[in-house]
Image: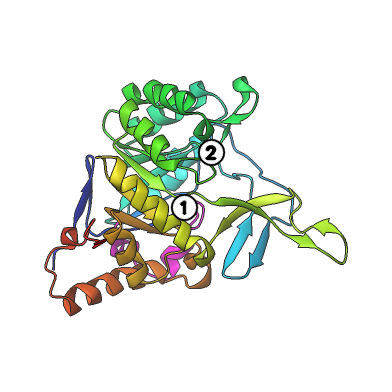
Amino acid sequence: MKLAVKIGKLKLKNPVLVASGTFGYGEEFAEHYDLSLIGGVMMKGISVKPRQGNPPPRIYETPCGMLNSIGLQNVGLKDFIAKKLPFIRKYDTAAIANVLGNTPAEYVKLCKDLDEAGVDAIELNVSCPNVKKGGIAFCADRRMLIRLIEKVRPVVKKSTLIVKLSPNVTDIASMALAAEEAGADAVSLINTLTGMAIDAHNRRPVLANVKGGLSGPAIKPIALRMVYDTAQAVKIPVIGMGGISSGLDAVEFMLAGATAVAVGTANFIRPEAAPEVVRGIEAYMKQHAISDVKDIIGALRVQ
């Protein structure tokens, strides 16, 4: 069976990735399985300078999901290139850097340095606030998103440029079209949905930051719909994520139009979840006599 897929210049041995923020930099999970078994690692988001993140409590389990308010804690660009990237390079898997900034200039520096460092792809986290525009998230304004991508596109020369879209917008397909228009090679979706939890007895929010990002199986139906809408709207590849924990979940996203998928919250529950998803896709293909995984992509029957 052929499992390989292509996203821009990025060639994946299989369509299963692990979502940024759910897998660290790969080191902890390498103790559980050979990272070469999966298509690629979308590593924890990187900023120019290290970040400490939000104060605890910053993770809370919800019915069928998880709220997190980590606050984008990370080691910073310098240590990532010097210490984290070489570790992933030991494995036959794609190294995908997720980047975050508060100004276009920060994104440009991150993308330029990481492209030169030889990452296979760069995923733009556009859910960050633009401090020069009053804290409006880049993902919330179509024109702002286009301008950001147009600024980073010239410095991303060797890597594949992926834009990670937020579901916390009115029309995600419109934002995907904006990303495509500006020169993105692919889009990934969905990022977490904004939510909150309250301790009724203490009359206080559970998370120190009050609100957080909801992920896990609870958001899967929303993610599926958004992936479907986006795949119908754009010609560039779509990477689907949001509640994937089995091979069948992954197949559903691919039927909806995703070229590849990313396993996120399931990694916290079962460290071996991603290779299990690969095996689940293979089992589905065998059951339905499918020889090439690309035949699944966008094959949903709606009539």
Q: Tell me, yes or no, whether the highlighted magenta stretch contains residue 127.
A: no
Q: Tell me, yes or no, whether the highlighted magenta stretch contains residue 27.
A: yes
**With 211 as the anchor, is 116 left or right in this view?**
left
Bounds of the magenta segment: 19-39
Q: Which amino acid lies under the numbered mark 1 shown in the image of this protein?
A: Tyr
Question: Badges 1 and 2: C-beta atoms under 8 Å apart?
Answer: no
The numbered mark at residue 293 is none
Q: Residues within 10 Å of mark 1 (few under 14, many from 20)?
A: many
Pick out the residue farthest to the right: 202
For the N terminus, which image quadrant? Answer: bottom left
Residue 133 spot, x, y in % from top left: 60, 21
Q: Residues within 10 Å of mark 2 (few under 14, many from 20)?
A: many
Residue 202 spot, x, y in % from top left: 88, 63
User: Is residue 1 shown to the viewer in this render?
Assistant: yes
Magenta-highlighted stretch: main secondary structure? loop
- The first of marks 1 and 2 along the sequence is 1
As measured in the structure, the alpha-carbon distance from the residue carrying label 1 to the one carrying label 2 is 20 Å
Q: Which amino acid lies under the numbered mark 2 shown in the image of this protein?
A: Ser
Element under label 1?
loop
Residue 200 sits above or below residue 78 on the image: below
In this orientation, which residue lies closer to the viewer: 175 or 21? 175
The residue under label 2 is 127
Residue at (24% x, 62% y) in the render: 303
Pick out the residue farthest to the bottom: 287
**With 299 as the anchor, is 168 left or right in this view?**
right
Residue at (46% x, 45% y) in the render: 83
Quadrant of residue 134 within the rendered picture: top right
The residue under label 1 is 25
**With 241 as the anchor, is 219 left or right in this view?**
right
